[in-house]
Image (cartoon, grey):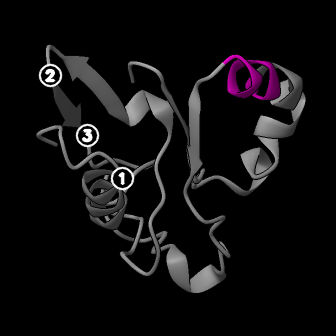
Amino acid sequence: MGETIIETPMALRARFLESMAYKDILLDYFASGSRWISALKPRLTDAMYEPTAPMGERLRDQEPVFDAANVLRFGTDLLYLVSKSGNELGAKWLQSAAPDRQV
């Protein structure tokens, strides 16, 4: 988002440490002057998921989770998709992290 890198809090346990694969790239951007923020890593306990709920409603709002694919930049606004990989609490965290943007 502009000069800011946002490291996302993944909802899938298998992707929990995914950003470690490109940590050197993030560090390079940070060293060159980019702002780097990271949401707190979620615990991803069993209580976070409701497997019997309809698709798109299986994530509970216990802690913020979302993936970069949940967010689309549209001019100065950010469009956020609540889905199986991002919850409403994730949108609220993003709003607090980007107060100059409409989420």
Q: Earlier in the sequence, mark 1 or mark 3?
A: 3
**Disc 2 designates what residue?**
76
Q: Could you classify mark 3 by the number of other residues whose Cα lies within 10 Å: few (under 14), some (14-19), or many (20 or more)? A: some
* Nearer-the-camera pick, 74 or 1: 1
Picture layout, residue 94 above or below residue 43: above
Q: Quadrant of the C terminus?
A: top left
Q: Give the range drawn in magenta.
A: 26-32
**Disc 3 designates what residue?**
81
* Nearer-the-camera pick, 41 or 46: 41
Q: Which amino acid does label 3 sit on?
A: Leu
Main secondary structure of the magenta stretch: helix
Q: Is residue 46 magenta?
A: no
* Nearer-the-camera pick, 86 or 6: 6
- Mark drawn on residue 97: 1
Q: How far apart are marks 2 and 1 (CA)?
A: 14 Å
The kind of secondary structure element at disc 1 is: helix
Q: Quadrant of the N terminus?
A: top left
Residue at the location (18% across, 41% down)?
Answer: 100
Residue 55 coordinates in the image, percent (x, y)? 34, 52
